[in-house]
Structures are given as C-alpha cells and as structure tokens.
Image (tube, grey):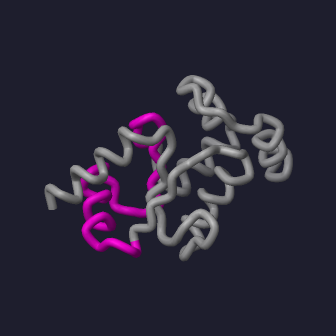
Amino acid sequence: MSDAMERIRATIEGNDVVLYMKGTKMMPQCGFSSRVAGVLNYMGVDFLDVDVLADPEIRQGIKEFSDWPTIPQLYVKGEFVGGCDIVTEMTLSGELDALLDAKGVAYDKARAEEIRKANA
C-alpha cells in the first residue's frame, strides 16, 4: 500500500485542487461524486479528478490517507476539505469561496453566488 500512498501524496502535492471520486468530472459514477464535481465545474474551478474505480489500491488508500471513510474527497492546496456533505454546506455558506480565496484558487464568484441563490 505504500506505493498507493506515495502516488496519493504526489498527486495532492502536485495539484492545487484534487477530487478523488467515483468516475470522472465529465462522467461521475455516483450521485455524491456528481454533486461535488458539478459544483466545482459550475464554479469554474480547475481541478484534477482521480477515478477511484479505476484503481482499487487508490480507492482504499485515499480512505486511509485522509482517515475519512467515504468518497468523494476534496483537497485544496494539499488540505483535505471533506466529502459531499461538507463541500455542499461550505458552498451554500460561502465557506468554500473563502477557502478558495485564501488558497489563491481561481473560480467564478458570480457562479458561486448563483448556487447560493438557487438553494436559498
């Protein structure tokens, strides 16, 4: 499993935003992954999608790496943010905007506001 852990570490350290998910950002394979990828795509966040279904070692390894039992998992500038429920709550409260701003990650602020208005 150390090879998987090293690949995970290198991926997270080498990319500003990484989403470990089931499927891809253009073809999610579960509702939770679809929701998080959809939010990031709609907000125009440039992110790397890692399909855990394509690699069983990564699928198990990411759970151990983060000590978080579920997928999807979002990382921003090396920091574990959370899964679907946390990302959804952060999006609706504006906390995700604040995190992206603090980390220097570009996104469409107007689109983020549209999400909040649509869910008010």
- Compared across the picture, whether 38 is left or right of 33 comes to right
The structure residue drawn at horizontal position 22% and vertical position 53%, both measured from the top left corner, is 5
Magenta-span inclusion, residue 50: no
- Compared across the picture, whether 10 is left or right of 34 comes to left
Q: Nearer the viewer, residue 14 or 108?
A: 14
In the rendered image, residue 31, in percent from the top left (x then y), is placed at 59, 71
- Compared across the picture, whether 119 is left or right of 17 comes to right
Location of residue 96 (image quadrant) = top right
Location of residue 28 (image quadrant) = bottom right
Q: Nearer the viewer, residue 89 or 103?
A: 103
- Compared across the picture, whether 108 is left or right of 5 comes to right
The magenta region covers 53-80
Q: How many marks?
A: 0
The structure residue drawn at horizontal position 69% and vertical position 37%, both measured from the top left corner, is 107
In the rendered image, residue 64, in percent from the top left (x then y), is placed at 24, 56
Q: Nearer the viewer, residue 97 or 56?
A: 56
Magenta-span inclusion, residue 64: yes
Q: Is residue 52 above or below residue 98?
A: below
